[in-house]
Image (cartoon, grey):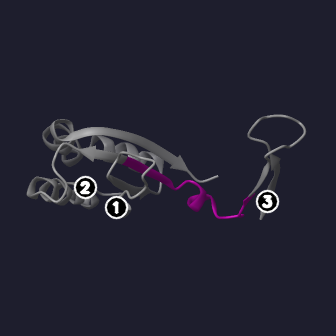
């Protein structure tokens, strides 16, 4: 384990509101894993067949080579207006880039995502 020492979100030297981040010593291949996430709200009514059809179509993205740990989840916090989240992991940036340019992904974005998603936020994470 490596201790990155006190990190202060305010950047001051006093360490107010500081926290400690401990990073496990892991093999290089594990550290390079990245997670692609998106939270979103659909234009469709909750519980509608259109909502269900969209989610089934989104689940097909799990079949793209390189995708691991694919999940679709319902967002339940009242602090966020998005209603769903999709996450998946990749063992390398090259696998993620291949996913982004894959024909199935591009067709899904064009035919389903753009016309059916009201609002979204994407975030991609690398292990530290």
Q: N-terminal of the two: label 2 or label 1?
A: 2
Q: Kindly state the secondary structure of the residue where label 3 is placed.
A: strand
Seen at 41% across and 50% down, the residue is 37
- For residue 118, above or below residue 90: above
Q: N-terminal of the two: label 2 or label 3?
A: 3
Magenta range is: 22-38
Callout 1 environment at 10 Å: few (<14), some (14 to 19), or many (20+)?
few
User: Spatial distance from mark 2 to mark 3, Cα to Cα?
Assistant: 36 Å
Whether residue 21 appears in magenta in the rendering, the answer is no
Left or right: 43 as drawn, with respect to 80: left
The numbered mark at residue 47 is none
- For residue 48, above or below residue 43: below
**Where's residue 40, x and y in %?**
32, 45
**Where's residue 43, x and y in %?**
18, 42
The numbered mark at residue 73 is 1
Seen at 77% across and 52% down, the residue is 19
Whether residue 34 appears in magenta in the rendering, the answer is yes
- For residue 69, above or below residue 18: below
* Front disc: 1 or 3: 1
Q: Which residue is mark 2?
A: 61
Q: N-terminal of the two: label 1 or label 3?
A: 3
Q: Kindly state the secondary structure of the residue where label 1 is placed.
A: strand
Mark 1 near mark 3, Cβ–Cβ under 8 Å?
Answer: no
Callout 3 environment at 10 Å: few (<14), some (14 to 19), or many (20+)?
few
- Dividing the picture into quadrants, the one containing residue 87 is bottom left
The numbered mark at residue 2 is 3
């Amino acid at each position: 384990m490596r201790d990155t020492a006190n990190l202060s979100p305010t950047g001051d030297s006093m360490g107010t509101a500081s926290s400690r981040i401990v990073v496990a010593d892991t093999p290089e291949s594990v550290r390079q894993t990245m997670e692609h996430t998106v939270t979103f709200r659909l234009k469709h009514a909750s519980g509608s067949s259109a909502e269900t059809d969209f989610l089934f179509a989104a689940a097909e993205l799990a079949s793209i080579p390189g995708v691991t740990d694919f999940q679709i989840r319902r967002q339940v916090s009242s602090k966020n207006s998005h209603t769903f989240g999709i996450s998946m992991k990749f063992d390398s940036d090259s696998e993620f880039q291949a996913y982004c340019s894959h024909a199935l992904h591009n067709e899904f974005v064009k035919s389903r995502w753009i016309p059916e998603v009201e609002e979204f936020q994407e975030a991609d994470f690398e292990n530290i």
